[in-house]
Image (cartoon, helix red, strand yellow):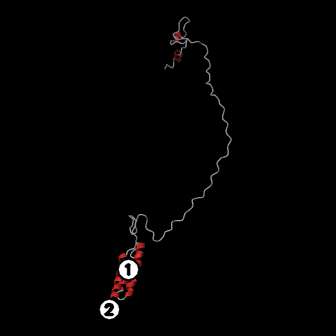
């Protein structure tokens, strides 16, 4: 803005009198008009502080009141329920009929029913006497029930033991009837 050597420049800008830019003419003469306007030399009034904010009454602090609601009762922890008992002969699950295994589950590894094997063997041995055929029929019927419950294999052998046993009994009955008919 100004040269540091001319420290009077700012005074001139704001209407200062008695200072000139020429150091030889530092004081203007009394008869010369000044190029700067002159202001009254009365002191400026002191600045007024801003008006204070109005003070209102501070609301009184309410006294603490008792809780109008009763305390909540303490509830016991979650009761434990017994697990579902497993019953024999329950189907494998909803949506899947018995005998079919759902995708992703291993097949039941029950193997072949032993009574189905014994039924077929007893019926075949019953050729010589009728007791083996009767035992084969009884074991075959029991084996079919077990196969239906457990999903085991051997249904064909159980049916074979039943049919072979029935066939041998029918043949023995026919043989006995023919023997008595021929002798009479």
Residue 87 lies, with reference to residue 44, above or below; the image says below
Q: Return the residue found at the far bottom.
A: 183
Mark 1, other Cα within 10 Å: few <14 / some 14–19 / many ≥20: many
Q: Position of residue 59 (x, y in %)?
A: 66, 35
Is the C terminus in the top left, top right, bottom left or bottom right quadrant?
bottom left
Measuring from the top left, give residue 57's x and y in whole percent: 66, 32
Residue 134 drawn above or below residue 50: below
The answer to which quarter of the image holds residue 147 is bottom left
Q: Is residue 30 above or below residue 4?
A: above
Residue that extends furthest to the right in the rendered view of this protein: 63
Q: Tell me, yes or no, if residue 173 can be seen here.
A: yes
Residues at marks 1 and 2, CA–CA distance in whole angstroms: 37 Å
Label 2 residue SS: helix
Q: Is residue 119 above or below residue 14?
A: below
Crowd class of label 2 (few under 14; some 14 to 19; many from 20; radius 10 Å): few
Q: Position of residue 19 (x, y in %)?
A: 54, 13
Q: Secondary structure at mark 1?
A: helix
Which badge, 1 or 2, is on the more N-terminal residue? 1
- Evaluate whether residue 114 shows in this view: no
Tally the marks: 2
> x and y percent of residue 162 in the render?
37, 80
Which disc number belongs to residue 181? 2
The residue at 37%/87% (across/down) is 130
Query: Which residue is most to the top?
Result: 31
Q: Which residue is mark 1?
A: 117
């Amino acid at each position: 803005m100004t040269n540091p050597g001319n420290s009077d420049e700012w005074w001139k800008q704001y209407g200062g009198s008695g200072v000139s830019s020429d150091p030889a003419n530092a004081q203007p003469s009394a008869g010369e008009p000044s190029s700067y306007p002159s202001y009254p030399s009365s002191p400026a009034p002191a600045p007024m502080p801003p008006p204070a904010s109005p003070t209102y009454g501070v609301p009184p602090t309410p006294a603490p009141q008792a809780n109008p609601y009763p305390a909540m009762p303490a509830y016991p922890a979650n009761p434990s329920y017994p697990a579902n008992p497993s019953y024999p002969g329950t189907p494998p699950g909803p949506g899947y009929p018995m005998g079919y295994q759902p995708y992703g589950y291993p097949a039941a590894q029950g193997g072949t029913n032993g009574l189905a094997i014994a039924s077929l063997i007893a019926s075949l041995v019953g050729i010589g006497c009728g007791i083996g055929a009767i035992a084969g029929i009884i074991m075959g019927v029991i084996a079919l029930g077990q196969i239906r419950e457990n999903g085991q294999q051997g249904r064909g052998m159980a049916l074979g033991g039943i049919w072979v046993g029935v066939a041998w009994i029918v043949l023995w009955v026919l043989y006995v009837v023919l023997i008595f008919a021929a002798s009479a």
